[in-house]
Amino acid sequence: MRLRRREILFLIGCLLFCGTMTAFADKDDNLQTRAFIDGVRYYEAKNYTEAVAVFEKLVFDGIRNGKLFYNLGNAYLKKGDLGPAVLWYERAMALISGDPDLQFNLSYAKSLVKDEGGEAPSPVFQVLFFWKDMFRLNVLQWTGILLNGLFWLLLGLTRVFQKSVLRSFCYGALILSVLFLGTAGWRMAETKYHPKAIILPAAVAVRSGFAPESTELFELHGGTKVAVEKQSPGFLKIRFSKDKIGWIADTAAGIIK
Amino acid sequence: MKQLVGLFCLLFFFPQSLFAETVQAFVDRTTTSMDTPIQLTVSIPSRDATVDTSVIKDFEVQPAGTSTQVQIINGTTHQEETYRFLLIPNRSGRLTVPSLRVHFDGQTHHTQPIEVQVAKGDNRARDTGGPGIEVKAEVSEAAPFIGQQVIYSFVLRFGIQIANTKYTAPDFSGFTAKQIGEQQSRQRVISGHRYQEVMLSYLLIPMKTGPLTIAPAVLRCDTVSQQHRRSDSAGRFFNDPFFSDSFFGNRQLTPRILRTEPLTIQVRALPAETGQAMFSGLVGHFTMSASIEPMQIKVGDSATLVVTVAGTGNIMDANAPVIEVPDAFKQYADTPESDIKLGSEGYQGKKVFRLALVGVTPGAYQVSLGQSTYFDPKESAYRSLAVSPLSIAVQQADGPRENPVVFSSSENRAALPGIVKKKVDFVGRDILPIKTGIDAVAHREEMTFAGFLTAIVLPALFFLLGMGGMKWFKKNGNPATVMTQKSIRALKVATKSVGDSNAAFLSNLYRSLVYGVCAKAESCSESLTYAEAGRILQAAGISAQQSDRVSDLMKKIDSARYSGFALDRTEKDVLLSETARIVKEVLR
């Protein structure tokens, strides 16, 4: 089979395009690595403002990494911005909750938060669903998916070989997969439909409405965790506790995604 | 005629104009006092309206319920929603309830502003000649020093029946404030009237110097009064004491607001220290005592030095005194123990510091405690906290000693003997360092909800596909099915090759017949003798006559195949149609 000249030129073009794209991707990776190293240097030189700018740029470039979020939390905390520091630590917790450094720093940052109280899950709920926050979300997801796959495989083998021992394993896999998948789904739905947010400025007035002249109901301080009840353009309806609900500007709180 | 038309128009339009959709706001009175709230009513000709009361600044607004009224006039339904609010004046003077924005049916309407004259209130409310209700606030010290404990007391005294009380404590700005215990109640007789007195106390510690004002404490309540009995003829019927019971709602509640007078406190700075001793930071009245037990030990044995600081004031801030221990001792400090209570005079109690001394070198020694001062606000002077040096003698031990037993607080005693356990406390606070590995810039893709659901559903689909496939293979692996399909296929090929050579055409016809017979026998075979075909068909329940026809057709095809005669198109068509018919009958 002989290729025509036009087809050969098209193939060469495709190869060149792919090569260029790969080169651009590599170049992007290199730039991000270099920027990250710069950020670390700024941090170590106690230039926290620059470190925040560099780490934040990496996040805005689309990198989602718990360690990067942790570094951003550290840089903000050293800079003296408690609210954003807690926000980035919380975001890191969603990805690397088992990291002891993160747990230590978040605990320290929370100890600096001025507002006491807030909403805590009921003790009954904590006892009945103790496993809910025990694992990272992706661990729950993948364990559930693998168990689900195992269940269907065992179900197929049970149908073929008709062995009762396989049926027992099948039921076991089903129960475990429902448990893990249900918990993962619950966590994902919670993040999507009942998100939590962190107050960013040092102090923010929570009002009864959108208008600046609306009654100031209470005041919250940087780093305080609240539940987001409703999102309107430019505003968030937040709940600090059962009896403390109001509106704030959406720039005054960062949602933990 | 014109008059009739005019009358009709009047009758037609009058009810319409009467119920024109307007928003109205009105108050139950336009003159009130600081201690009497007014009721604001907003009437709206629609449901699901929102009334923006955030613009009301001169009053505190409390929702007091809504009601709906539906009227049907001339067949037209008119609905009116009424929103009620309780307005509590924030100050006296001419106050305004501004124009309120009311939003309903996609439109915003405005009410008319209302002016209300508010007179200065009284912290007392009293019916003519009878006992009343009053509130007052007082502090134990009008000119305290910074850090001095001050007791703030709120007293509610009432000789009439009250209900729905709601107390709002003042904002103790400039103080640290803590409520002392629960409220205390007692009964008193004043001017021949019996009063109930309720008192609430707070401990205040001024945090800055200068004048500090404690805003009024506010008490909201409803005074309960009996309604007058009916005097008309119908009312006399109900004048039975049975109907006077509160169950029949003859109680009348009147909302009242009582405010205490604001209190101004002049907070004084502590005077300059004059002595040599260091100021301990304590403000109040304190004493210090110290002891060593035992006072004689042997080398390797331990004695316990106990220093107790006790008194009234900020005792929790007391630090361990400076203790000068000779080098002849090893020393182990224990966790301080506190026994502090918040009482009617503020914080009082004691703090105990213990130091274990282990004798190392024999001899007679003195342990002295550094002198410090505290500020006594009653005397307006600094007072010394000091104790005389304590003596202790260390004697030569009888033999070698290891792991001396030293005193430890109750929480650490389990670890004895031998080692003084200490709770690990932070001596400095900082965060742990950042992550420097470049894996921190690796993007971690998270699973989307759709991906998650797909991953769950996919194995189920595979399972269903697998089951379906198995079923299909099971069905299609049957020899009868295979042979039937092969027979039909061979017949089709023969039909197509009717114009081709004899060999291909006849061969396909023959195969179609053989496969058809095999399908009946549920066995796979490529060739059969005529006798075998007959036996198979008869065994399968085909009549002998039909079996013979199949055998005959097979012979006919065979003879045509191997005779060498070329069949013309008509002969081929006849043979094809006969074969097709017989195959169809066999496979039926």
Image: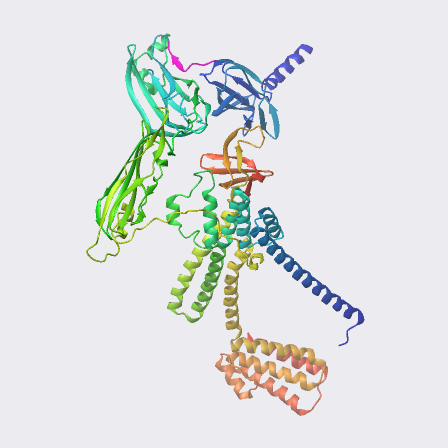
Name the side, left or right, on which B568 lies relative to A187.
Answer: right
Instruction: Look at the magenta stretch and give its main secondary structure.
Output: loop
On the image, the x and y values in percent for residue B26 come to 53, 17
Q: Please provide the residue range marked out in magenta.
A: B120-127
As drawn, which residue projects farthest toward the left?
Answer: B398
B121 falls in the magenta region:
yes
On the image, the x and y values in percent for residue B183 come to 33, 26
As drawn, which residue projects farthest toward the bottom?
Answer: B563
On the image, the x and y values in percent for residue B395 come to 21, 50
Viewer-closest of B337 and B244: B337
On the image, the x and y values in percent for residue B249 come to 36, 19
Total numbered circles = 0
Name the side, left or right, on which B134 lies relative to B560.
Answer: left
Viewer-closest of B188 and B241: B188
Asked if residue B294 is positioned above or below residue B350 in the image, the reply reads: below
User: Can residue B84 be seen in this snapshot?
Assistant: no
Name the side, left or right, on which B109 lies relative to B65.
Answer: right
Viewer-closest of B405 and B201: B405
User: Can residue B341 be seen in this snapshot?
Assistant: yes
In the rendered view of the protein, which quadrant contains the N terminus of chain B? top right
B124 falls in the magenta region:
yes
Asked if residue A3 is positioned above or below residue B270 in the image, the reply reads: below
